[in-house]
Amino acid sequence: MKSLKKGDKGAVVKQLQENLKALGYTISTDGIFGNETQNVVTRFQWDNNLAADGVAGSNTLAVLDDLLNESTVGGIDISHHNGNINWNQVPQSQVSFVFCKATQGRAYKDEMMQANMNELKRLNIIRGIYHFLTFKDVTAREQVNNFISCGIDFSQPGTLPPVLDVEWQQSDTLNKYIIANRTACVNKVMSWLEAVEKATARKPVIYTNSNFWKDYLGNPAGFESYPLWVASYRNDAPKLPAGWNDYAFWQFTEGGTVLGITGNVDKNIFKPGMRQLKKMALL
């Protein structure tokens, strides 16, 4: 196992930084082993009774891997933008769950969703799908129908609850529409959640960002009972939307690296731990 030290750069350094961040250390994930990374590695070594030399050698990396396996549950979310994935290369020690984009709006279906879900099932990786909510010129019911028509059996062991992606739209015009029609848009979110819960007998997860939830939806009440998947690209604890005291999933970077996947990958943590993840996935 190669040692990583000050001056090193690249994907392996970025993975080291992401692993330290997943354990709660405040660190940038830029792929550059500079002073900050050296200081965090040293602090990690002190915390774990290792030789505190600031070099991530075999002992340090082995302890880091053991702690990751014990204390955090990592996962990713993907769409067709990630291209063809070599799932046989994806390390399950780092990827315990995967969310696939399924649908968007009235009719769009992600062309890679079914293939990815089939592979995840083959490998017994916990998996789920999400719908990207469109606010303008399409009803909640039409979007529910699009999502449900994917044919995913949410009662099948290994399957996570449905997810509703509530965030910025693809143009400033559409985003301004949300502010101008805030009440209707909030009602659309709730209508989708209630209809999908009724159709699947699973309580959906809400994916959102605290800034969007506040600036565009006005921090609406009544959603606190839904599990939260928060997008918050910070080096410390995530910023939560109003109404939630805690999160289930935290998307902590959109620039992660994963073996078997080309390019940047969204990486996540499931906070409650593996036992609760299995319970959520009906295992």
Image (cartoon, rainbow, N blue to C red):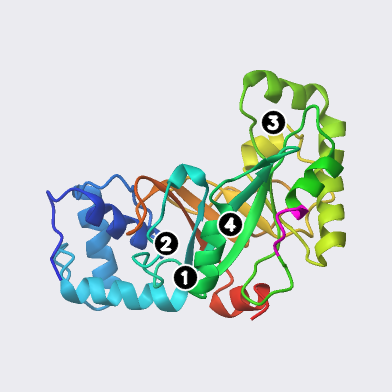
- Boundaries of the magenta span: 148-152
Instruction: Give the SS element for disc 3.
Output: helix
Q: Can see residue 270?
A: no
Q: Amino acid at mark 2?
A: Ala
Between label 2 and label 4, give the one nearer the viewer. 4
Q: Amino acid at mark 3?
A: Asp
Residue 205, percent across and down?
A: 70, 57
Which residue is the site of mark 2? 22
Name the foreground residue: 234 vs 114.
Answer: 114
Q: Amino acid at mark 4?
A: Gln
The image shows residue 55, relative to residue 143, as above or below, that is below
Which residue is the site of mark 3? 215
Question: Is residue 223 toward the left or the right of residue 129 in the image?
Answer: right
Name the foreground residue: 247 vs 140.
Answer: 140
Instruction: Give the SS element for disc 2.
Output: helix
Q: Which label's residue is closer to the chain start, 2 or 4?
A: 2
Q: Tell me the CA gap for discs 3 and 2.
A: 28 Å
Instruction: Give the SS element for disc 1.
Output: loop
Quadrant of the drawing holding the C terminus: bottom right
Q: Amino acid at mark 1?
A: Thr
Q: Tell me the CA gap for discs 2 and 1.
A: 7 Å
Q: Tell me the CA gap for discs 2 and 4.
A: 29 Å
Which residue is the site of mark 1? 72
Q: Tell me the CA gap for discs 4 and 3.
A: 34 Å
